[in-house]
Amino acid sequence: MSEIRYDYLTDNWVVIAPERERRPHDYPIHVYPTKSTPSKCPFEPGKEYLTPHEIFAIREPGTSPDTPGWRVRVVPNKYPALRIENQPERKRRGIYDVIGGFGAHEVVIDTPDHFKHLHNFSIEEMKELLFVYRERMKSLYGDKRIHYVLVFKNYGREAGASLIHSHSQIIATPSIPKNVDDEVSQLRKFFRERGRCYLCDEIDYELNDTKRIVYENEKFVAYCPFASIVPFQIRISSKFHSSDFSRISEEELYSLADLMRTVFKKLHKTLINPPYNMFIRTRPPERPYPEKPDYFVGMDSFFHWHIEVFPRISVWAGFEIGGGWYINPTSPESAAKFLREVLL
Amino acid sequence: MSEIRYDYLTDNWVVIAPERERRPHDYPIHVYPTKSTPSKCPFEPGKEYLTPHEIFAIREPGTSPDTPGWRVRVVPNKYPALRIENQPERKRRGIYDVIGGFGAHEVVIDTPDHFKHLHNFSIEEMKELLFVYRERMKSLYGDKRIHYVLVFKNYGREAGASLIHSHSQIIATPSIPKNVDDEVSQLRKFFRERGRCYLCDEIDYELNDTKRIVYENEKFVAYCPFASIVPFQIRISSKFHSSDFSRISEEELYSLADLMRTVFKKLHKTLINPPYNMFIRTRPPERPYPEKPDYFVGMDSFFHWHIEVFPRISVWAGFEIGGGWYINPTSPESAAKFLREVLL
């Protein structure tokens, strides 16, 4: 019997539909090996002249920017959705509201290796990538006109990736994106009613219930949310309360890298190289909002950063787009079991 | 220069990104002709035994249910997400909220012709399909446990259609889907501030501005919304105020059929057979909500039904899923111009 589950964190409802039950091998969408060769790839070492000038990199000592020797490299997006040169002014156009296309749009080249992806990163490589995410967040928040930094990754064509070579993206926006703002509202509401962090409760509950746990280590945990809106959705978070990803410590980065490496290996093996999106959901930085004076009160207490992984093995159709509800044909209990038990 | 536009109706923000400008022929996603043959199709006349028993049909006089002679036929979905036999009880499960999988999930077989789709429907065929949508809405609202009826259509694999033969779907839910509830909130807010219908304002503005109009006739209009969240998004609505699609008159159905037929022809020709989702956004029926006593006050004055068409020629990626903002690389002004000027 199907049931309709609620995700408090994101205010989403999902129909878990066992009548439509699908196991890992029933999902036909995979990232297939392609004929993409390093020789034509703008993200290869030695091809640095094909990208805009680098903003940041982890490099071998003594090597120069825009030359080989980097292990992770950040460049501006060649076709940016938002630009730092634009003005973040809010204006009226006829009956409509418009904000100038101010912001930043960066590309993180995750690795110099054309054939390597998160599922075959070493812990050290994963740690350096997470370190770069943290550093870019901190740096971008130095510009007080930036109200949010969204770090995300698209893997595979169905997830929106246009290049094979492993890369992530960073978009900094002049106001808080809707899904982040919605989550702030939910977590604030819970905190005002109960005086504690909702996600701490959820993580505690999941660790005790165990059914939806994918993997855990000392500091972090990965689980399939009770109301997963897509099959094999994975939520990654810290067992300790922490609102701001940009304040994660070196030691925590290492522990998170261990967990993420395992999670991506499991996902890759269970779903046979699925496309996916990943993003970091962290608290927005404090900025003055005269129209919402209480916006940041208690933020560090009620917000809890997390990383979400959305395999793109099913298609959102008219019900999801029209209704804003979701149908998920694989229960998160079943998904977590497959992910937990897969042999690596 | 890119800009960030706001859609008041749906509370969505979208980055209109001319740096990434794409014209119709730059979108590589099309619905390709397939080898699908009528002989294996469960929606063919003569194959009625392959579907559950019919719920409703428009038929030739003297023909019996579940036999040929129908022009539009409605059957239960063989793999329903929600079922009328389940109970709509709201329960707690651990720390989570769950509603029983009560509801209805129907399939509308739009035409007996295996090779016909909305873009080659006659006005009469389109009118009969819209008539069936209206009749199913009215009938399902007879069950007071049903709080919303979502009528939608998926065309093409990328839009979630698993069968080629033209069909629509109807899902009736035990509470109001999120996107509908969000729109109710937006329209109520506007009405309480201004005393009028937001969408009437928007339609009036668009008819005067003309830049985003795709097609209009005496009673209806189709335009690309100012903050279209996908390329070539089309909003269809009535020039007169009307909150409830299920109360549309016969004469209005005919006029709407004329407009929709033209719109789907234009879309098909401009984007070379794109996949798309379509859905009807109409007011929810009045039901008792003790926790929200004012929910329906003024609903007929502030809600305005509309139909949305979302071509699925681009992919939502980490920015859209993580941020809940959208990037649209084709401005609605440009999309509307292509759609307006295409030769039929």
Image (cartoon, coloured by chain):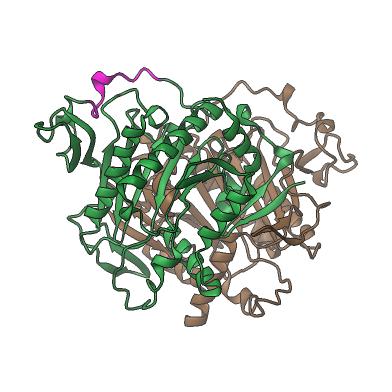
Chain colours: A brown, B green
Q: Nearer the viewer, residue B117 or B259?
A: B259
Q: Give the residue furthest to the front.
A: B218
Placement of B293 over or under A47, stated as above or below = below
Residue A197 is left or right of residue A280, and the answer is: left
Residue beneath the point at 65% across and 54% down: B5
Q: Nearer the viewer, residue B106 or A227?
A: B106
Q: Is residue A289 visible?
A: yes
User: Which residues lie in the magenta part?
Assistant: B34-44
Residue B148 is left or right of residue A33, and the answer is: left
Placement of B297 over or under A158, stated as above or below = below
Residue beneath the point at 86% across and 35% down: A67
Residue A255 is left or right of residue A208, and the answer is: right
Placement of B236 over or under B266, stated as above or below = below
- Say if the magenta span includes residue B148: no
Residue A206 is left or right of residue A54, and the answer is: left
Question: Mostly what secondary structure, the magenta segment?
Answer: loop
Q: Nearer the viewer, residue A219 or A149?
A: A149
